[in-house]
Image (cartoon, rainbow, N blue to C red):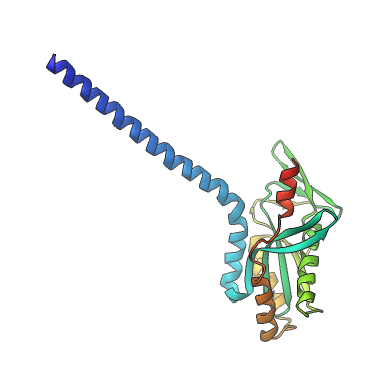
Amino acid sequence: MGYALGLIFVILGIVVITVIILYSLMQIMGKSNAAKILQYGRDREFFIYEMLSNAFDKGTVFRNLYFPVVTKEGTFDTEVDVVCVTRGGIAVIEVKGNKGRIDSPSGPVWIQRYGDKVLRFENPYTQNEGHIKAINKALRKSGISNVPIKNYVVFTDSHTTFSHRYPWLLKPDNVVETLERLDDKLILTRRDQRIISQIMRNHRRRRNMTFKQKYRKKR
């Protein structure tokens, strides 16, 4: 009887230890998968941000900035992926992670073809024009005008191809070179750079509901 009872306790102990180990493994895997999901959305911008921060003064490079846009439905924040304040003007960068073949006409809609997947999305250059208007408004509000603002779109996947190419449509391997050419133009003084960078710094926090949040709320 004593032997049987001891055996039962041993088996129960093994079962409990096994459950604890399995639970711990599931927790670790769950956190890892969640991190990967979040990483895909965030790291595209962070990748470009880090690349530019290593090439330019880190105090002139920003990511995930928020600028207010007034609409008939209220004021919403538009989120800007990456901004670099160079001596030649402000580079406003829309970052995309779409893979495969991109039909990239000058019209309002682009198409991604990846395997059997077909996805229509807004022309990112046009999308970024909205960001530039919001940045321009913020600059004018601070008494700054006539600052060159350049529109760039970067696709981070190295295997992405395009049906049309434009000077502003970039891949990671030519982002720094393109912005260095802009920096060489020396239109802005160092003081101008500091003032504009401070304005950008003031927009690192979201103050209103974003357009993305508004869209999700409607779905």
Q: What's the residue at 60%, 54% (across, down)?
A: 42
Residue nearest the observer in this picture, 205 or 175: 205
Residue 148: in sight, yes or no? no
- The picture places residue 154, in percent across and down from the top left corner, at 69, 59
Left or right, 200 with respect to 151, comes to left
- The picture places residue 138, in percent across and down from the top left corner, at 76, 71
Quarter where residue 173 is shown:
bottom right
Q: What's the residue at 30%, 29% (across, down)?
A: 16
- The picture places residue 32, in percent across and down from the top left corner, at 47, 45
Residue nearest the observer in this picture, 85 or 199: 199
Left or right, 24 with respect to 59, comes to left
Q: What's the residue at 65%, 76% (across, down)?
A: 198
Question: Which image quadrant: the C terminus?
Answer: top right
Vertical side of 176 occupied by 47: above or below: above
Question: Which image quadrant: the N terminus?
Answer: top left
Residue nearest the observer in this picture, 75 or 135: 75
Vertical side of 73 occupied by 10: above or below: above
- Residue at the far front in the pictured view: 74
- The picture places residue 185, in percent across and down from the top left corner, at 74, 81
Q: What's the residue at 74%, 76% (across, down)?
A: 89
Left or right, 52 with respect to 109, comes to left
Residue nearest the observer in this picture, 60 or 117: 60
Quarter where residue 142 is shown:
bottom right
Vertical side of 177 occupied by 48: above or below: above
